[in-house]
Image: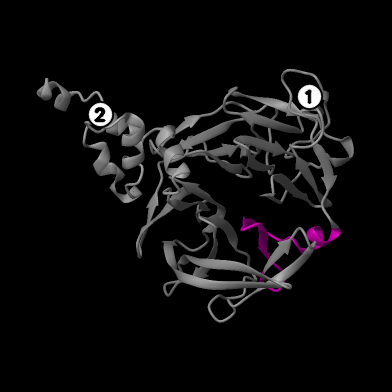
Amino acid sequence: MEEEQEDDPKTLITGLPDDLGLQCIARVPRVYHQTLAQVCKPWRSLVRSELFVSARSSLKTAQHFLYFMVRTHDSCFKWFVLSHYNHLKQTCPLPPAPAPTMGSACVVLGSSLYILGGSINDLPSPNTWVYDACLNSWRNGPRMRVAREFAAAGTINQKIYVVGGCQADTWARSASWAEVFDQKVGHWAPIPSPIEMREKWMHGNAVLKGKLLAMADRGGVVDDPRGGTSDGSSNSEKLGSWSFVSMELDTGWRGRAAVVKGILFCYDFLGKIRGYDSEEDKWMELQGVKKSLPKFLCGASLANVGEKLYVVWEGLGRNKETELLCAEVDVENKGVGLLWGTVVWYQVILSLPKGASTIHCLSLGL
């Protein structure tokens, strides 16, 4: 009987209930998960499951990694992950995406990265592609109701919301200018939206305090899924509460933003990092980083990685190659209008032929 249990164990850890076994295994650092997968089939299935990721998140043992997409000098799109353990950092390529697109929106849901729409052969696409970080593989996701490019998207309460990126010139496009994907249901559903808010192109987006902020050329809109009442149909989200962003937020937003500790960060026209406090409706310059970071006059990409602000930008190497540099900044809102940042580390994470640029930066917890 003992030999049978060793060959085909009935429990994760002998002598322990599976829920306790799960909690024990979930505390092992991510760097050893490949070793765990070689112990036995149940462990291999476990470390590749959403249950395992959820358990690590609940135990606060999940490790957050920076995933980013670059456009190379020859217009190819490639994804990478910046892995780290203690002070060691390594940039690793992901498998090629099924259909690289320009102008796609990207979000994270659970242990998966979703690419939404984009342009294929100069035509907007309704397709979605999903990268499963546990399996390190891509698959086709559920198609959106309408084709989109340069849309805004965000994850709120385990649902994906997407707005804009399409011309609301037909009934179908108008009705589905905004839509939501519920993983439990498995398909997209339209979200009613006011006609005066249906801009086509979105150049920025973020989720701030449970609300999706979508920035267009003529201002921006806010969708709060928690507001409003249901319209009574079975295949649509609540009416929600739509509004326009404040003038202060609109005039100060530039480039790819990130929300860290309840503050929205981006860079201004002088290349300085600033944070927006929604309670005070004002922008504040991030102090304490001037000596460590350059001015981002040519732009930068920002991401929240484990409640740390990650900044990614391009530089020119000694041999005129493009260097991707990354800095981790610990930010703190000290009150009385003071945002303080401490640069934890700052280094080159990737070198590519001249002309490469960063397109997307996201964080994924595993």
Question: Outermost residue toward the right?
Answer: 196
Q: Name the amino acid, label 2.
A: Lys
Residue drawn at x 42%, y 43% is 56
Which residue is under mark 2?
41
* Circle 1 Cα neighbour tier, 10 Å, few/some/many (<14 / 14–19 / ≥20): few
Colour convention: one colour
Residue in front for this viewpoint, 38 or 336: 336
Q: Are marks 2 and 1 in contact (CB under 8 Å)?
A: no
Quarter of the picture holding the C terminus: top left
Magenta stretch?
Answer: 247-273
x, y percentage for residue 158?
Answer: 59, 36
x, y percentage for residue 213?
Answer: 73, 48
In the rendered structure, find residue 172 and report the number of the disc placed on it.
Answer: 1
Question: Was residue 33 drawn as part of the magenta stretch in this picture?
Answer: no
Residue drawn at x 31%, y 29% is 17
Instruction: Answer left or right for 253 relative to 46.
Output: right
The local secondary structure at tag 1 comes to: helix
Q: Give whichever of discs 2 and 1 has the lower sequence position.
A: 2
Instruction: Answer left or right for 312 relative to 296.
Output: left
Q: Name the amino acid, label 1.
A: Ala
User: For the residues carrying marks 2 and 1, which lies nearer the camera in this image?
Assistant: 2
